[in-house]
Amino acid sequence: MTWLEQPHQSLTQGAILDGVDWGMGEDNPLSIVLSNACDFENDKAEYLMVAALLPASEILCNSREISGYAQGKRNGLSSRQKKAIKDALVKYIHNTQVCRYFFFDPNPVVDADLMLVDFQLIKSVSIDGQYEYIGQMKPVFTMQMMSRFVGYTGRVPVDRPDDDKVNEYIQTLTENHYEI
């Protein structure tokens, strides 16, 4: 499976760019265009909305979620911990949860490590900037990424039931099925 294809003739949503200044000097990450494709088609784009592309291994393995499974283990991980880490990583790889990141493999179009689109590291840049257009996410993956982006940024904060109420709900839901 290939997530990316060669650059198109013109810039559009899902374009992978090099040369966006993220203020990190020579360590500036690649970027992906989030701007609406219809804005490009109708010549309405004055700026590009881009997100940073970060190395997946570095971000995920250092995350609280993944590293939390390995805490306190100096002599290797138990099979349960290994399974928990694998299951958590599979959720990222399949992009099955709406979260801060969208996972993809840039190879063979872009010779780079596995990547994450970071929906919290976004900026607006001039459409006339000097960027190198190095790859294009395939449309089906672009649609999936944008769906995740909208789901992530469109979250509405609501009050949650307290722990006692959650336990009550769990008891009610399982009372005729499981002993919890």
Image (cartoon, rainbow, N blue to C red):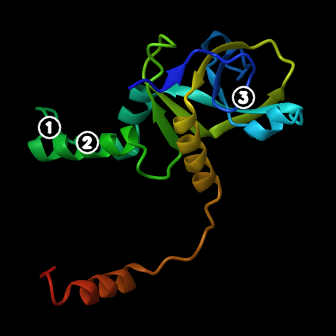
Amino acid at circle 2: Ile
CA separation in Å, label 1 and label 2 = 10 Å
Q: Residue at x 86, y 34 (%)?
A: 45
Q: Amino acid at mark 3?
A: Thr
Q: Nearer the viewer, residue 46 or 138?
A: 138
In the figure, is residue 83 to the left or right of 7? left
Q: Which residue is mark 1?
A: 77
**Residue, disc 2:** 85
Mark 3–mark 2 CB contact (< 8 Å): no
Looking at the rendered image, the disc whose residue lies closer to the viewer, 1 or 2, is 2
Residue 6 locus on image (x, y percent): 58, 15
Q: Is residue 116 visible?
A: yes
Q: Quadrant of residue 71 in the image?
A: top left
Earlier in the chain: of badge 3 and badge 2, it is 3
Q: Kindly indicate whether the residue at mark 2 contacts the one at mark 1 (C-beta within 8 angstroms).
A: yes
The correct choice, above or below, for 29 with respect to 145 in the image is above
Image-quadrant location for residue 175: bottom left
Q: In which image quadrant can residue 51 be found?
A: top right
At a point 31% along the width and 45% down the height, the residue shown is 88
Image quadrant occupied by the C terminus: bottom left
- Residue 12 - label: 3
Q: Quadrant of the N terminus?
A: top left
Measured in 3D between alpha carbons, the distance from the residue under mark 3 to the one under mark 2, in whole angstroms, is 35 Å
User: In the image, 10: left or right of 65?
Assistant: right
Q: Is disc 2 surrounded by few (<14), some (14 to 19) or many (20+) residues within 10 Å?
A: some
Give the number of the mark in front: 3 or 2.
3
Q: Residue at x 63, y 30 (%)?
A: 14
